[in-house]
Image (cartoon, grey):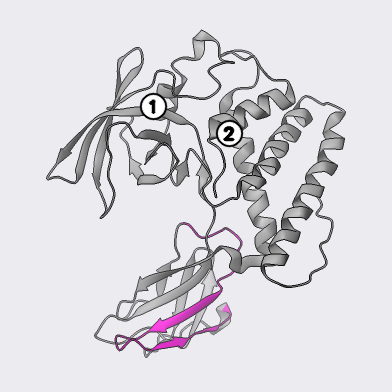
Amino acid sequence: MGTKRCAHLIRRIRQRSDNLDYGSEAGIGDEQIVDYINDGLAKLQSEIAEQHSEAFGTSALLQLVTGVEEYDLPDDMLEGAGLLLVEHKFTSGFYRKLKKLSMIERSDGSTYDPSGYIRKGRKIYLRPIPSRSSQDELRIEYVRKWDRIGVRRGIITEVELENADEIINIDMDTKSYSTGELFRNDDLKGADITAILDSDHICIVDRNGNFLARNIPINSDISSATGTDSLRISIPSHVLLTGEQIPVGSFVICEKDTSSHQLELDRTMERFLIEFAVWRLKSQDASNEAYEQQGYLTSIKNDILAAYAMMDETVQYITELPE
């Protein structure tokens, strides 16, 4: 399982689309290609989830609070996807399924054990409002969105911790760890430092893209380059979770829930991500080949959807998917 590293995907995309050279003022940069790859990921998951939503199902527990009606849904829930199941978990370990209600049925202020829920955006409202003195839980089954894919921005050289688990500073070397080194001009060597300083969060991964620490906030105003190819990242306040670590030699990736690899996709699905990005590049260049590429993409998506139908052991009619 898992795709190749993002850098390898970008090289394939550049070769397939004949975008081999670029600089700070000309050509198509890595950042735009990465955006196209992630657009392809989002499109692919959305269309698979429309027919096979349970393929990406996961669960979360929300702590209920006496007298509180409104709760936030998980941050990693796929936008536009419905909730698969909502249950009230009693402290005794008993679960009761909650009914989906409409906003007109929202609680009138009455309190008791919840029997129904209302979904509005990224919020869930319970009816009646929880009233137990002991804190029960809400178990939610939902469609989790895939992690994004990004490039390695640097390698960890030192980590300064306080109280063993609170990060203060992270030192990293950025030389030769970004994408497309074979294609990049010398004026782009500082692109990785710039990308980190423009980010609000970073993730730490190993050489295979496995997460070592997620969604660490950074203070860009205090972070600073300590050399041509090095950077000290200032962390405003972040305590590592149980099991998280930042070993020397691990890699820095920009933004939340982003890895150097897409770990949930079979490698055979790389073909779609590459061809989707190539199609976007050719469309941008107004190339006549973009029309042929669009038909090829549709055939790849149909193959993928058919594969998911077989995994479900359900015979389904696979429709042509419009762009």
Q: Give residue 280's position: percent from left, percent from top.
A: 73, 34
Which of 96/293 is in front? 293
Spatial separation of the CA atoms under disc 1 and disc 2: 17 Å
Q: Give residue 92's position: percent from left, percent from top.
A: 30, 89
Does residue 214 appear in the picture of this structure?
no
Count of numbered badges drawn on the protein:
2
Q: Report the span colored magenta.
A: 76-102
Which of 98/228 is in front? 228
Label 1 sits on residue: 154
Label 2 sits on residue: 34
Amino acid of disc 2 = Val
Q: Can you tell which of label 1 and label 2 is closer to the viewer?
A: 1
Amino acid of disc 1 = Gly
Say whether residue 14 is magenta: no
What crowding class fits label 2: few (fewer than 14 Cα within 10 Å), some (14-19), or many (20 or more)? many
What is the quadrant of residue 20 in the picture? top right
Which of 263/203 is in front? 263
Say whether residue 77 is magenta: yes
Q: Give residue 138's position: percent from left, percent from top.
A: 40, 77
Taking the spot 49% from the left edge, 78% from the top edge, the residue there is 86
What crowding class fits label 1: few (fewer than 14 Cα within 10 Å), some (14-19), or many (20 or more)? many
Mark 1 in CB contact with mark 2 (< 8 angstroms): no
Predominant SS of the magenta segment: loop
Does residue 29 lie above or below 107 as drawn?
above
Is 233 on the left or on the right of 160, as rendered? right
Is 62 on the left or on the right of 28, as rendered? left
Does residue 9 lie above or below 212 as drawn?
above
Does residue 98 lie above or below 261 as drawn?
below
What is the quadrant of residue 17 in the picture? top right
Secondary element at tag 1: strand
